[in-house]
């Protein structure tokens, strides 16, 4: 009987830790104040990454460079630029 109670206690603690773990990251919200309204920082990084990707595409077109798989290259470039901006400004 004691072993069974001990097992349920361990399961309860494990469940408590698993529930508390995601809540530990809620202490600080990365947001940016723009004209009195708070926007999530990832949204601004995504918009800037998309803009930089569009400018890179225009530069490629001007230099007459052709990509083999643009369907994969441009979203990958957008993700790379978005994550790089996030790391540079908010990490």
Image: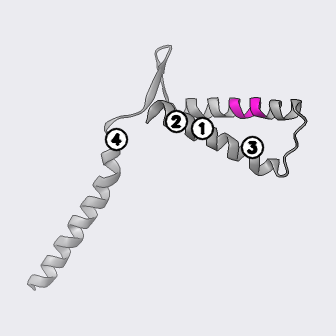
Residue under the point 69% across and 47% down:
76
Task: Tell me the SS state at disc 4.
Answer: helix
* Mark 2 to mark 4 CA distance (whole Å): 18 Å
| Residue 55 included in the magenta stretch of the image | yes
* Mark 1 to mark 2 CA distance (whole Å): 6 Å
- Magenta range is 52-56
* Mark 3 to mark 1 CA distance (whole Å): 12 Å
Q: Position of residue 23 (x, y in %)?
A: 32, 48
* Mark 2 to mark 3 CA distance (whole Å): 18 Å
Q: Is residue 2 left or right of residue 36?
A: left
First in sequence: mark 3 vs mark 4: 4
Residue under the point 81% across and 30% down:
59
Task: Tell me the SS state at disc 2.
Answer: helix
Please give the residue where the numbered disc 1 appears in the rendered image.
Answer: 82
Residue under the point 46% across and 15% down:
36
Q: Position of residue 42 (x, y in %)?
A: 53, 35
Q: Position of residue 83 (x, y in %)?
A: 56, 40
Quick check: marks 4 and 1 in contact, CB under 8 Å?
A: no
Closer to the camera, 43 or 75? 75
First in sequence: mark 3 vs mark 1: 3
Q: Of discs 2 and 4, which sits in the foreground?
A: 2
Please give the residue where the numbered disc 3 appears in the rendered image.
Answer: 74
- For this orientation, the residue located farthest to the top is 35
Quick check: marks 1 and 2 in contact, CB under 8 Å?
A: yes
Q: Is residue 47 left or right of residue 18?
A: right
Q: In the picture shown, does residue 32 fall above or below 70?
A: above
Please give the residue where the numbered disc 4 appears in the rendered image.
Answer: 26
Please give the residue where the numbered disc 2 appears in the rendered image.
Answer: 86
């Amino acid at each position: 009987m004691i072993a069974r109670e001990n097992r349920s206690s361990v399961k309860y603690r494990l469940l408590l830790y698993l529930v508390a773990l995601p809540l530990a990251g809620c202490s600080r919200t990365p947001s940016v104040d723009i004209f009195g309204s708070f926007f999530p920082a990832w949204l601004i990084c995504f918009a800037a990454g998309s803009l930089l990707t569009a400018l890179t595409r225009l530069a490629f077109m001007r230099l007459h460079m052709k990509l083999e798989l643009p369907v994969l290259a441009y979203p990958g470039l957008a993700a790379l630029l978005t994550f790089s901006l996030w790391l540079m400004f908010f990490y």
